[in-house]
Amino acid sequence: MSFDPYLHFQGNCRAAMTAYQAVFGGELQLMGYGDAPDATAEMKASDAIMHGMLLTDGRMLLASDFPPGFKGDPQQAVSVSHIAGSVPEAKRVFAALAEEGEVIMEFAPTFWSDGFGMLKDRFGTHWMISAPWRQG
């Protein structure tokens, strides 16, 4: 069993998921509200994303915009955790996500890993980026 995060955006899902694909690679699939068979006129006129999926290394990062006409709540109180395969890869991912974002905890060695950092990216998503954890 796995748990894969589903992020909700306020109109910038396409930009966020495209940026995440640039950082992590993988296959990106995006479906707009206007693609739904029973889409309302408001949905058909919108470029908002109804469902997005970034598939990489057998895991998914899922996302959507709130439906047209719904404000929704901005992302808060949840972080996406990513453990990179090496310290250099973790540093690269951290730097890319931090661009135009807000660093919460600088990327640095910790007692459990040779590198860990926390940030909120320019799309409002909170991330915890780590190098591989140290073995007991």
Image (cartoon, rainbow, N blue to C red):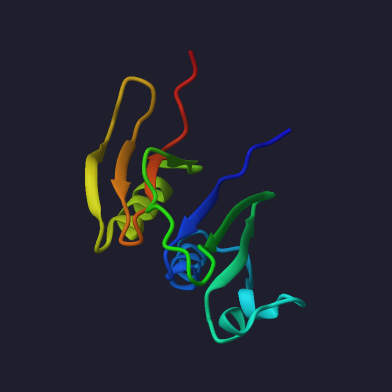
Position above or below: 125 against 82: below
Residue at 42% of width from left, 39% of height from top?
A: 78
Q: Position of residue 97 (x, y in %)?
A: 35, 57
Q: Nearer the viewer, residue 110 or 60?
A: 60
Image coords of residue 8 (percent x, y): 49, 56
Q: Is residue 135 left or right of residue 107?
A: right
Say whether residue 100 is left or right of residue 96: left
Looking at the image, which residue is at 36% across and 61% down? 123
Q: Quadrant of the N terminus?
A: top right
- What's the residue at 51%, 59% (across, down)? 24
Q: Residue at image x 32%, y 56%?
A: 121
Q: Position of residue 133 (x, y in %)?
A: 46, 27
* Residue 4 point in image, percent of width and height: 61, 44
| Residue situated in front as seen by the camera: 69 or 110 | 69
User: Horizontal placement of 66 versus 131: left or right?
Assistant: right
Q: Is residue 73 above or below residue 9?
A: above
Q: Is residue 77 above or below residue 123?
A: above
Outermost residue to the top: 136
